Each structure stands twice: as structure tokens, then as C-alpha cells.
Image (spheres, rainbow, N blue to C red):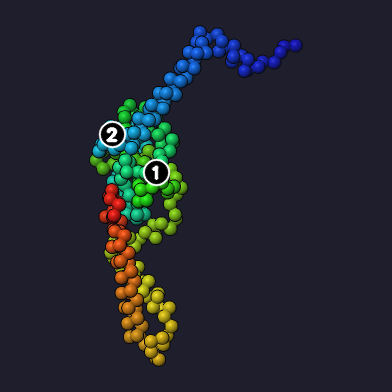
Amino acid sequence: MLPKTNIENKLHKAKLKRSTSEENRLKEVYAIFSNLDSELGRIEKNVATNDGIIQNRFKIDFLESSRIYHIEEIKNICIDYRLRFLDSKYFKGELPVEALSKIKALEQEHGLEIKGFKIIAPSKLFKLEDRDDPLLFAPIGNGYHYLIHQWGSDLHPLRKMLMWPFKGMVNLSILVLLLSFLVTLLVPEGLFSKSSSNVEFWIINFFMFKCIAAVVIFYGFALGKNFSPAIWNSKYFNS
């Protein structure tokens, strides 16, 4: 009867046949990990210290066209969802290992050191840690950027609608008008006079509009807020 083959034993015997000693083997493995740590450390430093690079010479044939975005497309998305598109050095969140690994793989594939990273994220992510949906880009040139990695949880499904009033003065004015009209409808009839009329309704509506507008203006000036088209690529906190 032939004995069964133990693959682990066979593997151990094959290992013993190699001239490499256990000590040298550990040194080789240590060197691999040291080199990997060094590479990831270099990449992390490049992300944290953006030096104004506006172009990386990627090999076009190796790029995925679905991950290439023009600055105007990025701008429109940032305005719609009130996000910022800034140099990665302003990002205060934690860069995931997956992002570093993808950068390293891209560098090996294209034979270059990638620099000039950009990130799309909510304003607060450039000030403190959060979990909202950042996207990491590298500039290609001529206004185009290559999406490297996206992480975190997705944005709220109603964020675009909630941020619609911040797109401009017209949008905000429409919201204030609608709010003042709805609040006026809630005012009981005959509250200010014995008989209600259209004139009284519109007078109350005008009063409500002024009150809500005053609150909105005070809030905007007090917190230094601005409309989305003015802040999507602004690095300043009071915007």
C-alpha cells in the first residue's frame, strides 16, 4: 500500500533543497516589506505635500477612459452637491491603504511617480475626519483628471436637492419665497382682522418674506457662507 502524499511535507523538503538559509530567507522577506513600506511612505508623502504639479505623463493606452474627467464636469458635480475639489494636502481625513496600493500599481504600470493629487469631498472633510465619500484624482493635463480611488460611505440621496438653494441667489430667493408663502398659509384667518381678504394675505406674506430673508442673510453673513459656485475650489474656511 502506497502512503498518502502530505503536500506540506513535500513543500518543506523542497524548501530544504534550496541553498538559501532560514536567516537569509527572513532577510529577503524583511527587505521586501521594508521596500513596500518605503514605497507607500513615499506615496503618502506625495499625497500630503502637493507641489503644484498639473500634469502626469501617463501612458494613454493603459488608462481607463471611464475614469477620466474634465475639470468642467468636476466643477458641475461639486456645485450640485456642494463639494470641494482641492489639493490633497488640505485633506485632513485618513487615506485608505487601498488608495495607496492603487497609486503604487498605477506608478508601476505607467513607469512614473504620480504627483499633484486632488480630492473631491465635503468641506468639513478638509477640516476634520469624517466618512463622506471622498474621491482621489491625479491631473493628466489640459483640464483632465484621472480618478484613482473612491472610499467612505456614499452621500445622502437627497443631498443634491438639499444643496440646490446654495447654487445661487436666484435659487435661494425662490426657496425664501416658497417658505414665506407656506408660512403665510399657516396663519389662521381673522388673526389680524375680523374679515380676511387677499390684500391682508399678501401683506402677511410680504412680512413673512422679510423675516425669513433677514434670518437667511444673518446666517450667511454670521457664518461667512457663500454660494457653491464660489467655493467649489476654494481653500479658505470662511467661504
Q: In the rendered view, does 91 fall on the left or right side of 9?
A: left
Count residues near mark 1 (Cα–Cα under 10 Å), then give few for <14, some for 14-19, many for 20+: some
Q: Which residue is mark 2?
A: 56
Q: In the rendered view, does 15 fall on the left or right side of 64?
A: right
- Say which residue appears at 32% left-offset and 78% top-offset: 207
Total count of labels: 2
Q: Which numbered circle lies on residue 67?
A: none
Residue 139 higher or lower than 124, as above or below? above
Percent across and percent down for residue 216 are 32, 67
Residue 228 higher or lower than 59, as above or below? below
The quadrant of the image that shows the N terminus is top right
Count residues near mark 2 (Cα–Cα under 10 Å), then give few for <14, some for 14-19, many for 20+: some
Look at the image and tell me whether residue 39 can be seen.
Answer: yes
Percent across and percent down for residue 94 are 41, 41
Cα gap from disc 2 to disc 1, whole angstroms:
24 Å
- Say which residue appears at 43% left-offset and 58% top-offset: 158
> Which numbered mark, 2 or 1, is in the foreground of this view?
1
Name the quadrant containing residue 210.
bottom left
Q: Which numbered circle lies on residue 93?
A: 1
Along the viewing direction, whichever of 132 and 178 lies nearer the viewer: 132
Q: Amino acid at mark 2?
A: Asn
- Say which residue appears at 51% left-offset and 8% top-offset: 19
Q: Amino acid at mark 1?
A: Gly
Q: Earlier in the sequence, mark 2 or mark 1?
A: 2
Q: What kind of element bears circle 2?
A: loop
Residue 209 higher or lower than 116, as above or below? below
Along the viewing direction, whichever of 19 and 198 lies nearer the viewer: 19
- Say which residue appears at 38% left-offset and 27% top-offset: 39
Q: What kind of element bears circle 1?
A: loop
